[in-house]
Image (tube, grey):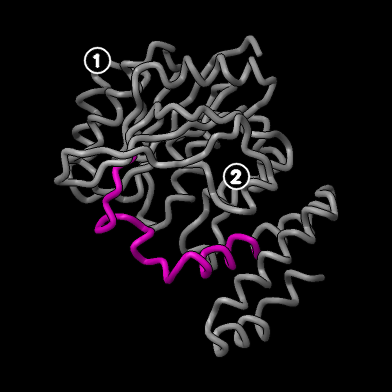
């Protein structure tokens, strides 16, 4: 793992008030990056002007415009397509990194001989001066089995090799995934490599429910139903995923159905389950 050319992808929409801090946390890394791709989703505020002001002194900061889609998977995938680095890192435009994040992660990826790495985060609520550790996990690795129990990977913590996207196909853009596109992608990636996990918080996660796509989520089980449905459809098409993993994913779908109201479960069975069990 000698190639440390890193592309950073930051999707954004009307985040003029946070985008500068996010970008500067990348530029202040102890491990320099090759490029910072700001993937816009049709912002109508002065996000672009603030980004271009930083880019005037930091040419590695690149603005990638796009129409309003309302789903972060689309601008993230635009960034993946444009990225030149062998390693790709993701950062949401309201989060920030600690200065040694990338250096620590690359060292851990080498130490564990894996192609993906994530880390813990400090969780901060807007208006509050306190912070808390986001995840309670003592594992050194995140595996497919662990991910099927719960999503242990904040999107802004991820650093992985670009070649993994050849099979994973990027963030799923299906309209059935109202939230959880990142969770769905991590499941796909984990069939190719474990994620090294650093328990020390190396990023700051801004838990702003009022401006988060997660505010639209019905509940955790609805999200799991969509995520594992997507995984089953992808795995069935690929025909390279071990049968045991596919069966485990289908079991998670049944667990999610059991926890939904009867009318919703029946409606799903009529319209969607045939696509998941074929």
Answer whether residue 76 is magenta in the image: no
**Is residue 199 rendered to the left or right of residue 165?**
left
Specify start and end residues of the magenta stretch as a single range. Answer: 205-229
**Is residue 180 rendered to the left or right of residue 12?**
right
Task: Answer above or below: position of 205 versus 14.
Answer: above
Between residues 272 and 134, which one lies in front from this camera angle? 134
Mostly what secondary structure, the magenta segment?
A: helix
Q: Quadrant of residue 98?
A: top left
- Percent x, y of residue 45: 18, 47
Marks 2,1: beta carbons within 8 A: no
Answer whether residue 215 is magenta in the image: yes
Residue at the spot 32% in from the left edge and 41% down from the top edge: 123
Determine which of the numbered discs, if any, sits on residue 186 in the image. Answer: 2
How far is mark 2 from mark 1, CA to CA? 34 Å
Q: Which residue is mark 1?
A: 57
Task: Answer above or below: position of 206 versus 254.
Answer: above
SS type, badge 1: loop
Q: Nearer the viewer, mark 2 or mark 1?
A: 2
- Percent x, y of residue 38: 36, 35
Closer to the N terminus: mark 2 or mark 1? 1
- Percent x, y of residue 264: 55, 84
SS type, badge 2: helix
Q: How many C-alpha atoms fall within 10 Å of the one at disc 1: few (<14), some, or many (≥20)?
A: few
Residue 64 shows in the view: no
Q: Quadrant of the C terminus?
A: bottom right
Q: How many C-alpha atoms fall within 10 Å of the one at disc 2: few (<14), some, or many (≥20)?
A: many
Residue at the spot 58% in from the left edge and 19% down from the top edge: 108
């Amino acid at each position: 793992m000698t190639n440390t050319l890193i592309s950073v992808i930051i999707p954004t929409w009307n985040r003029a008030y946070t985008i500068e801090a996010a970008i500067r946390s990348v530029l202040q890394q102890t491990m320099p990056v090759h490029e910072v791709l700001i993937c816009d989703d049709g912002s109508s505020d002065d996000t672009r002007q603030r980004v271009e002001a930083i880019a005037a002194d930091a040419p590695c900061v690149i603005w990638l415009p796009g129409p309003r889609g309302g789903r972060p998977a689309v601008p993230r995938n635009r960034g993946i397509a444009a990225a030149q680095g062998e390693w790709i890192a993701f950062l949401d435009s309201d989060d920030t990194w600690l200065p040694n994040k990338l250096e620590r992660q690359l060292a851990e990826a080498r130490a564990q001989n894996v192609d993906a790495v994530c880390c813990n985060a400090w969780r901060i609520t807007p208006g509050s001066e306190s912070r808390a550790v986001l995840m309670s996990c003592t594992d050194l690795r995140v595996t497919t089995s662990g991910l099927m129990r719960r999503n242990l990977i904040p999107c802004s913590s991820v650093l992985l090799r670009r070649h993994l996207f050849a099979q994973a196909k990027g963030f799923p853009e299906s309209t059935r995934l109202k939230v959880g596109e990142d969770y769905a992608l991590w499941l796909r990636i984990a069939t190719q490599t474990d994620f090294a996990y650093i328990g020390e918080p190396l990023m700051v996660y801004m838990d702003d429910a009022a401006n988060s796509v997660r505010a639209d989520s019905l509940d955790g089980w609805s999200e799991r139903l969509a995520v594992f449905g997507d995984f089953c459809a992808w795995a069935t098409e690929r025909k390279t995923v071990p049968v045991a993993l596919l069966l485990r994913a289908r079991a998670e779908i049944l667990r999610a159905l059991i926890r939904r109201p009867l009318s919703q479960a029946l409606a799903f069975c009529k319209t969607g389950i045939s696509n998941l069990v074929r």
